[in-house]
Amino acid sequence: MGTRGREIIGMDVEQLITLLNQAYASEWLAYYQYWLGAKLIKGPMKDAVAAELNLHATEELNHAVLVANRIIQLGGTPVLTPEGWGAVSPCAYDAPADPYVAVLLDQNIAGEQCAITTYKGLMDATKDKDMVTYNMALTILEQEVEHEEDLQSLQEDLELMAQRVQ
Ligand code: FE
Ligand code: FE
Ligand code: MG
């Protein structure tokens, strides 16, 4: 932990680490939900959707790397166990028990919307107080917004296709 780097933070650092760990836990849940969903997926457009789910899984893992590094930089400890992910995350883990493409899209859209709320909250909490975390949260938020749009446009394609078939 860098001492001067910690001194310039204008908020309670332990509270900040708690917020970061919530985001961190959510990234692992999102990673696994995407990764497993991409393997199980069934239904129309499954290859196109699986490709997007796999890409998003990789991107969620990269978010976990960024957030873990920041937690460690602040002198904190990232959530130590998989059990902790579910306990700490503000976002639900939706198991891909039903592999139908539209169901997986709905579940992952809900996950992205929760992630957007989480990073917006992290930005609100760190604005003018911790520029480094604020900037990291913005970088991740940009990608979560992109993820939501990617999935909603796949959902729209699926609905258009269903209408044409009728
Ligand atoms: Fe993410
Ligand atoms: Fe995402
Ligand atoms: Mg994408």
Image: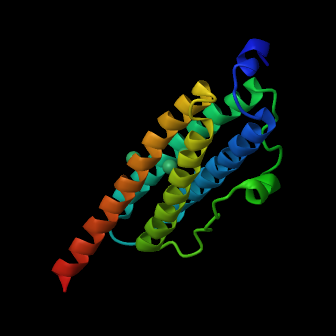
Image quadrant occupied by the N terminus:
top right
- Judged left or right of residue 109, residue 154 is left
* Residue 32 figure quarter: bottom right
* Residue 5 figure quarter: top right
Number of numbered discs: 0
Q: Front-most of 113 and 164?
A: 113
| 29 over 11 or under it: above or below | below
User: Where's residue 37, x and y in %?
Assistant: 53, 61
Determine the residue positioned at 75% across, 38% down: 17
Q: Front-most of 117 and 11?
A: 11
User: Where's residue 132, x and y in %?
Assistant: 60, 25
Determine the residue positioned at 41% across, 55% down: 148
User: Where's residue 6, x and y in %?
Assistant: 75, 21
- Judged left or right of residue 109, residue 119 is right
- Residue at far left of view: 164
Determine the residue positioned at 51% across, 72% down: 99
* Residue 134 figure quarter: top right
- Residue at far bottom of view: 166
- Judged left or right of residue 157, residue 34 is right
Image quadrant occupied by the C terminus:
bottom left
Q: Front-most of 33 and 144?
A: 144
User: Where's residue 66, x and y in %?
Assistant: 61, 32
Q: Front-most of 131 and 104?
A: 131
| 24 over 47 or under it: above or below | above
Determine the residue positioned at 81% across, 27% down: 75
- Judged left or right of residue 146, residue 124 is right
Question: How is this picture coloured?
Answer: rainbow
